[in-house]
Image: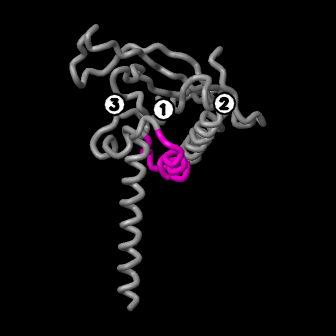
Amino acid sequence: MILKIYHKVVHILICAFITTNIVLLVTASLPDRSAVGNNIMNLLARYQTFFALDQMWSMFAPNPASVNAYLDAEITFKDGSKERWTFPRPSQMHGLEKILGGERFRKYSQENLVPMEKPEVWFDMSRFVAREIDRLEASGKHREVSEIQFYRHFNIVPLPTYVFIPHGQLSTQFETQAVFHFKPTEKVRYEANVNH
């Protein structure tokens, strides 16, 4: 009896999972939505974001996104020493790590961590980096983070009609801009400043 109930519950959960993902896929893929479509997306927004199932139309023709960017940060410790922290980059990943996480890291960094936008996301990112550094330092030199300066390195990918870049050839020249400054001890929740 218990086994039958268990199988029914598993069957219902699998059907709900498949149905939810099909509805999400179809509704999110439409460039224009009805009120019903918007209500569905509002209901599933957290699920979509958590599992990185969202897809921006900016990747499609005729005007796909042309910015190639990555992030890193200069960590300054209270003793005056400095270290570099780099946000995970798909081009630096290999194997299963790249397949499972590469695109999610790219989407997060290129579409969410942009200069002068979404300061609350920058603040959360800063706290994450500070926690990661504190965790590493707890088993190392035991330094305390004084401040974190994030930098965005970017270039514009030229149109294929302008210059042909062979597949797999990585960009080597990037412009750099300071995009966010964070001090863990400040009471101010966030500070987006590109004038550093």
Image quarter in which the C terminus is found: top right
Give coordinates of residue 119: x percent, y percent.
64, 31
Residue 176 located left or right of residue 16: right
Q: Amino acid at mark 2?
A: Phe
- The mark found on residue 53 in the picture is none
Residue situated furthest right in the rendering: 187
Magenta residues (range): 33-54
**What residue is drawn where x is 78% and y is 36%?**
187
Q: Amino acid at mark 1?
A: Ser
Which residue is identified by label 2?
Answer: 182
Q: Residues within 10 Å of mark 2 (few under 14, many from 20)?
A: many
Residue situated furthest left in the rendering: 166
Q: Amino acid at mark 3?
A: Ser
Q: CA distance from mark 2 to mark 3?
A: 27 Å
Which residue is identified by label 1?
Answer: 109
Which residue is identified by label 3?
Answer: 91
Image quarter in which the N terminus is found: bottom left
Give coordinates of residue 57: x percent, y percent.
41, 31
Look at the image and say whether residue 39 sits in the magenta stretch.
Answer: yes
